[in-house]
Amino acid sequence: GTVIVGTNVYSICVEKHHFQKLAKSILRDKDQDLSSIPAVRHGILSEEICRRRYVLEQTKKNICSATHPCELVVDPTASYLCCSPHATVVEVVNSIVSYGIFECKCVYAEPGATWNDLISSRESFCLERKDDKLQLRSDHAYYLQLIALSDTLDLNWIDTCILKGQDVYVRRLIHDEEVSSAVKKTHNFLLQLSSARYNKNNLICKL
């Protein structure tokens, strides 16, 4: 199978690159091992810490959450499309049970760096300040990746927990039909990409 990362999901959705150029780039890099990159390794090693911190933050809001690590999930309507979220969530609020997805993002940064430092120094950082409030950028690749995960699993909400040292930002995204319509371009892209003209091997898009 082939893993298509969030950056490529973004490029597909906004039609940033011509199909042939993007397809060749994805197939060229599909076997690349990213685990040795410091930021990637930091994210892998910090996932469990981030998951526990998320549960703690929800408890502070009187929300009882239980997270369950999730393996590969295949889209029942498109077998070539799958995802592997960090966890599924069972949430209880006022005796009402709901189900969602949990995704974590562990930021690799210098000790002592603040959110504002990262926003001003990293053009591609996923957070921004608006009216002096921290928020997830809706024009960021990570945002579209979250929506794609939600659509593939067909659940109404997805929570992301962005962790940097002791600082944490939790945001819930609810199903948005307008954004989802853009994300569905991934399906059409993969149908073309999996054709014999571009790739003779089995192709799976893992979000």
Image (tube, rainbow, N blue to C red):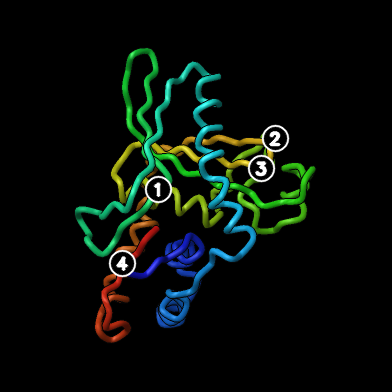
* In the displayed structure image, the side of residue 194 where residue 126 appears, left or right: right
Name the residue type under label 4.
Ile
| Mark 4 or 2: the one toward you | 4
Label 1 or label 2, whichever lies nearer to me, is 1
Q: Residues within 10 Å of mark 1 (few under 14, many from 20)?
A: many
Which image quarter holds the C terminus?
A: bottom left
Residue 24 position (above or below residue 116) = below
Residue beneath disc 3: 164
- Between marks 4 and 2, how big is the CA–CA gap? 41 Å
User: Are circles 3 and 2 on residues that touch, CB within 8 Å?
Assistant: no
Q: If you read the primary sequence from the N terminus, does the residue marked by circle 1 or circle 2 appear first?
A: 1
Residue 86, percent from left and from top: 43, 46
The front one of 113 and 122 is 113
Q: What residue type is labelled 3?
A: Lys
Q: Name the residue under label 1.
A: 85
Mark 1–mark 2 distance (CA, rounded to whole Å)? 31 Å
Q: What distance separates the C-alpha of mark 3 from that of mark 1?
A: 20 Å
Q: Is mark 1 on a helix, strand or loop?
A: loop
Marked residue nearer the N-terminal end (4 or 1): 1
User: Which residue position is annotated with label 2?
Assistant: 131
Q: Which amino acid does label 2 sit on?
A: Asp
Q: Quickly name the residue at label 4.
A: 204
Cα–Cα gap, marks 4 and 3: 31 Å
Q: Are marks 4 and 3 in contact (CB under 8 Å)?
A: no
Q: Which of marks 4 and 2 is nearer the N terminus?
A: 2
Task: Give percent across and percent down for residue 202.
Answer: 26, 74
Residue at 27% in and 79% down: 201
